[in-house]
Image (cartoon, helix red, strand yellow):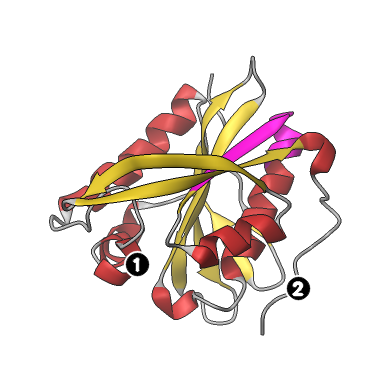
Amino acid sequence: MTLATPSLDTARLRLRPFTDADADHLYALHSDTDVMRYWDSPPWTDPARSGRFIATCGRIQDEGSGARVAIDRVSDGAFVGWCGLTSWNPEFRSASLGYVLDKSAWGHGYATEAAHAVLTWAFDALDLNRVQAEADTRNAASGRVLEKLGFVREGTLREDCVVNGVVSDSWIYGLLRRDWQPSNVPNPAR
């Protein structure tokens, strides 16, 4: 079952399917040690990873297990990151949310705005009951994004990641359909 990757517009962002033209931007994003410091894998060192990531986006769409979208800023067309849902389970009506933004985009409310658009699409198109997300316990900013969206911190996965020899814990967040407020569009930070 193929799941069509959406194209979504917000006040300041354009969310769209990935293309091969995004490879250099993806590599710059995922090879940045600051951006990846709380991620569950080390920064990329091989530019070919970008092509594999884009291929994986197509594969999860074709399998019907998720959708990832590139995030462009409307004002200048700049690629600022990506957001997506993976592990979609139609039987359990659940999925997992993830996002990565370039550090130049941090603190502007873009993650919240993009995730809100993806969640609005997903609750409608996929008839979700639950969306789950994880955040490294050292990444308070990502926790705040999730909480603004209505996610509830449900627990801690102790020492669930070891990246470059560093052991870290993750918070688990959940958002249920009954708690989702699609009309509560987040206010841009700036």
Label 1: state its secondary structure.
Answer: helix
According to the picture, the residue beneath numbered tag 2 turns out to be 187
- Answer whether residue 4 is visible to the viewer in this image: no
Amino acid type indicated by mark 2: Asn
Give 180 or 53, whichever is nearer the viewer.
180
Quadrant position of the N terminus in the picture:
top right
Determine whether 97 is above or below 141 in the image.
above
Give the residue at x 56% y 30%: 3
Q: CA distance from mark 1 to mark 2?
A: 23 Å
Of 22 and 104, nearer the camera is: 104
Q: Quadrant of residue 57?
A: top left
- In percent of width and height, residue 135 lies at 48, 52
Q: Which mark is residue 35?
A: 1
Q: Is residue 94 magenta?
A: no
Q: Give x and y (percent) for residue 107.
A: 55, 78
- Range drawn in magenta: 122-134
